Image: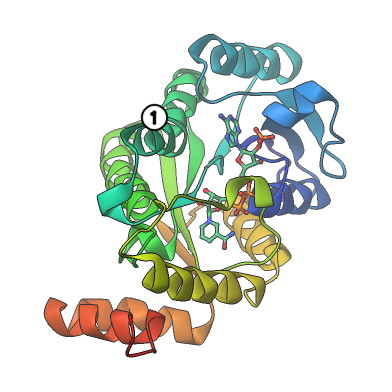
């Protein structure tokens, strides 16, 4: 397999870190980008640390320039950086939604815009965008996150159509629940005396349970590394348990009203909520 130069944005924890490690194991030159590396955090094994804040235009541009100066090219970009706050949509502060859009969607777009010109000039490249199963269907109290991940899906589809002519391939990754994500990004917002309190507790307990019993991050790391190593990478990559995969099919097949009832029954088993 040809060794490639790869930038992984959001590689200080969770899936991004696992992806960076898997790519380095495969012999690629991996730049692991995240803000924590500016504060001295150890990079993933075999990777070079790059201080990267996807919300800062100049910082993203400088990160890509560093890679070009040191390696002369950038073959693949993997965008994992994301933030995640659970809240009832009725109570979601506008600035929380703005912040999630700023990191999960606009930050991703900023990384893509910095990487595309060198990829075009060198005659090709591979952009890997982290969506989620929540980019395919929504679940309660993760509405804002689902909005950002549905945005990633739309962005990835259009980008693939536009950039193909330059030999640039796009893979949208849709993981199901995985263990090992940073607690820094498992935030909640609920008003005091909220009418959603009981449902929120039940729904978020279920979400935390599913994540802590989810797939090991190495499974996603390996799948993405395999895709990056391919000459013809897939347009989408679902990495999820069979049960979570079946929800994608149900979303596709069931009338929406029925699907919404099915999801509600899954998250709110008690009659009280
Ligand atoms: N875990 C899951 O079950 C799951 C399921 C489906 C999809 N996903 C997706 O997979 C990706 C990774 O999720 P995760 O849960 O494994 O990760 P995580 O542990 O929550 O880590 C998030 C990463 O994003 C980085 N980040 C946040 N804000 C940033 C910023 N402004 N600039 C640069 N980096 C920033 C963090 O680094 P710093 O704080 O150091 O900057 C960290 O490396 C996300 O896109 C997530 O939506 C996760």
Q: With respect to residue 206, does 226 lie above or below?
A: above
Q: Residue 234: where, in percent of width, then height?
A: 45, 59
Q: Quadrant of ligand 1?
A: top right
Q: With respect to residue 98, does 210 lie above or below?
A: below
Q: Residue at x 59, y 23 (%)?
A: 53
Q: Looking at the image, how many numbered discs can be counted on the residues?
A: 1
Q: Nearer the viewer, residue 260 or 126?
A: 260
Q: With respect to residue 153, does 241 lie above or below?
A: below
Q: Is residue 62 left or right of residue 154?
A: right
Q: Is mark 1 within 8 Å of ligand 1?
A: no
Q: Nearer the viewer, residue 53 or 32?
A: 53
Q: Which residue is mark 1?
A: 106
Q: Residue 242: where, in percent of width, then height?
A: 49, 86
Which element is circle 1 on? Answer: helix
Crowd rating for badge 1 (residues with CA inside 10 Å; few <14, some 14–19, many 20+): some
Q: Quarter-wise, where is residue 256 in the image?
A: bottom left
Q: Is residue 269 left or right of residue 114?
A: left
Assign the C terminus to one quadrant of the image: bottom left
Q: Residue at x 39, y 89 (%)?
A: 269
Q: With respect to residue 161, does 221 lie above or below?
A: below
Residue 38 visible: yes
Q: Is residue 54 left or right of residue 116?
A: right
Q: Quarter-wise, where is residue 214 in the image?
A: bottom right
Instruction: State how the image is colored.
Output: rainbow
């Amino acid at each position: 397999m040809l060794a490639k130069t790869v930038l992984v944005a959001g590689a200080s924890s969770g899936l991004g870190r696992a992806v960076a490690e898997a790519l380095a194991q495969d012999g690629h030159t991996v730049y692991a980008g995240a803000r924590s590396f500016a504060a001295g955090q150890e990079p993933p094994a075999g990777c070079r640390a790059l201080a990267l804040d996807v919300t800062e235009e100049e910082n993203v541009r400088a990160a890509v320039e560093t890679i070009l100066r040191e390696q002369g090219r950038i073959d693949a970009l993997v965008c994992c950086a994301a933030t995640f706050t659970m809240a009832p949509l009725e109570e979601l502060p506008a600035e929380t939604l703005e912040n999630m859009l700023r990191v999960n969607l606009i930050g991703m777009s900023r990384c893509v815009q910095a990487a595309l010109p060198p990829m075009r000039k060198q005659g090709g490249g591979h952009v890997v965008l982290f969506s989620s199963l929540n980019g395919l269907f929504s679940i309660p109290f993760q509405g804002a996150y689902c909005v950002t991940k549905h945005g990633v899906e739309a962005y990835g589809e259009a980008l693939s159509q536009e950039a193909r002519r330059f030999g640039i391939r796009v893979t949208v990754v849709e993981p199901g629940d995985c263990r090992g994500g940073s607690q820094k990004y498992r935030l909640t917002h609920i008003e005091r005396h909220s009418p959603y309190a009981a449902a929120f507790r039940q729904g978020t307990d279920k979400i935390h349970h599913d994540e802590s019993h989810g797939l090991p991050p190495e499974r996603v790391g390996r799948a993405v590394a395999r895709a990056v190593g391919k000459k013809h990478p897939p347009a989408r990559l679902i990495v999820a348990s069979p049960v979570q995969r079946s929800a994608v099919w149900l979303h596709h097949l069931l009338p929406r009203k029925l699907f919404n009832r099915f999801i509600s029954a899954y998250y709110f088993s008690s009659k009280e909520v």
